Amino acid sequence: MNITRIKCTGKHGPEEFRNLYKRAYDVGDPNKENYNETDAKLSWRQWIYFYSIQDVMFCGMRDYGKFARIFDRFFIFPEHRKTGLHHASHSVQIVNKLVKDSLEVYKIPFVSIQERRKRNSLIRAVEEWNSVINTTHKFEVLPGLYCTVPDNPDDERCWQNIATLNGQPIDLPMRE
């Protein structure tokens, strides 16, 4: 499958990006509000790159200072979904590109997933990714939950499980 990478510049992103976001919103997914027009504009301005595998999936790489959150707003179209965060081959196909691109812009990649109960999904995904990453670096799931939107600690959705490359400590609020 062909991975498309778009550098995120400008206010709104190209039509291809907006169309994918609209399609994701229209699916009616439980996280559909992550794909509304307002979020699309906000995400575009905070991303370094946007990635897609045509008609299969898309995600962004969000700038977090010395870190980059990969698989940000990760979306798999329903006809390509499997169970768990790793979604079979789709995330495995793109994880090397995301890690490589993060390191090339001098960012430490990390990935996050909402809810303490989904921690095992992240652990399984990390194990799978670590088996295919083309680098001596490996992801490690950090203990506890981290607030990925430090300005909004009262929103439980902001408290997420995090895995960083080499278990690098991340400068975000944490709770056990």
Image (cartoon, rainbow, N blue to C red):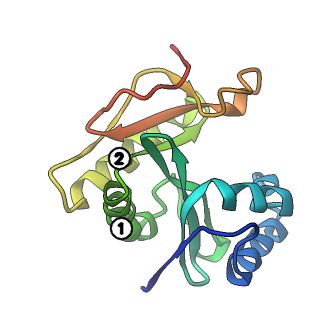
Q: Position of residue 117 (x, y in %)?
A: 57, 31
Residue at 54 percent of width and 26 percent of height: 146
Element type at mark 2: helix
Tell me if residue 160 comes above or below residue 175 in the rendering: below
Q: Amino acid at mark 1?
A: Lys
Q: Amino acid at mark 2?
A: Val
Q: In the figure, is residue 162 to the left or right of 107? A: right
Circle 1 is placed at which residue position? 97
Residue at 71 percent of width and 76 percent of height: 20
- Say which label, 1 or 2, has the lower sequence index: 1
Q: In the figure, is residue 129 to the left or right of 32? A: left
What is the quadrant of residue 98 in the picture?
bottom left
Name the one closer to the observer, 31 or 148.
148
Tell me if residue 14 comes above or below residue 96 in the rendering: below
Name the one closer to the observer, 68 or 143.
68
Element type at mark 1: helix
Q: Which mark is residue 119?
A: none
How many labels were placed on the picture?
2
Residue farthest along the left direction in this orientation? 136
Q: In the figure, is residue 108 to the left or right of 117? A: left
Circle 2 is placed at which residue position? 126
Q: Residues within 10 Å of mark 1 (few under 14, many from 20)?
A: some
Q: Residues within 10 Å of mark 2 (few under 14, many from 20)?
A: many
What is the quadrant of residue 58 in the picture?
bottom right
Q: Position of residue 9 (x, y in %)?
A: 62, 69
Which quadrant does the N terminus fall into? Answer: bottom left
Q: Position of residue 77 (x, y in %)?
A: 65, 72
Q: CA distance from mark 1 to mark 2?
A: 15 Å
Residue at 57 percent of width and 84 percent of height: 54
